[in-house]
Amino acid sequence: MKAFDPDYKLLDEMYQDEYYPDFLVDKVKDALQKIIDLLENGETDTEVVQETLDEAVCAINNLQEEFDENDSEIETVARDCIGVAVAYILEWFNIPIDTEDAIRERDW
């Protein structure tokens, strides 16, 4: 089993931007961490991985109202940052899922 890159800072660009409240970025990070945990446990079945990705993306979708309530939103910078993080996770673990497919459930 392979551990995730300890030097990679998930969602660093969002954390560095005051527009995104850290506690909400933490919630996005928690959703992505579920994917990392699955992969660190050795899961390689792309259907199982995609199901977990779908769940994570839906969890992020559900945060949109909370972002709005805190004068923020999941917009271009956040979308790009989340997409880059997902791509990096998949590449790190050699999971052959295209990034667009991986985040297919997004509504942000």
Image (cartoon, grey):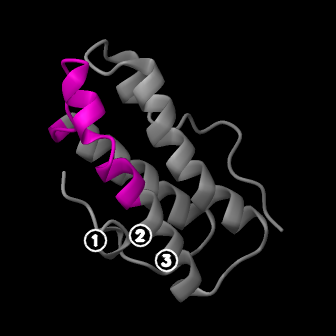
**What's under tag 1, amino acid-wise?**
Arg
Q: Earlier in the sequence, mark 1 or mark 3?
A: 3
Residue at the spot of label 3: 51
Is residue 88 found left or right of 79 in the rendered image? Answer: right
Is residue 73 found left or right of 31 in the rendered image? Answer: left
Magenta stretch prevailing secondary structure: helix
Above-or-below relation of 29 to 94: above
Q: Are marks 2 and 1 in contact (CB under 8 Å)?
A: yes
Residue visible at 41% across and 28% down in the picture: 24
Label of residue 104 in the image: 1
Above-or-below relation of 24 to 83: above
Determine crowd level at label 2: few under 14, some 14-19, many 20+ residues with C-alpha closer than 10 A: some
Q: Residue farthest to the right? A: 1
Q: Earlier in the sequence, mark 2 or mark 1?
A: 2
Label of residue 24 in the image: none
| Mark-to-mark CA distance, 2 and 1 | 7 Å
| Mark-to-mark CA distance, 1 and 3 | 11 Å
Where are the magenta residues, as a range? Answer: 57-76
Above-or-below relation of 14 to 19: below
Q: Are marks 3 and 2 in contact (CB under 8 Å)?
A: yes
Instruction: Assess whether residue 70 is covered by the magenta stretch.
Output: yes
Label of residue 54 in the image: 2
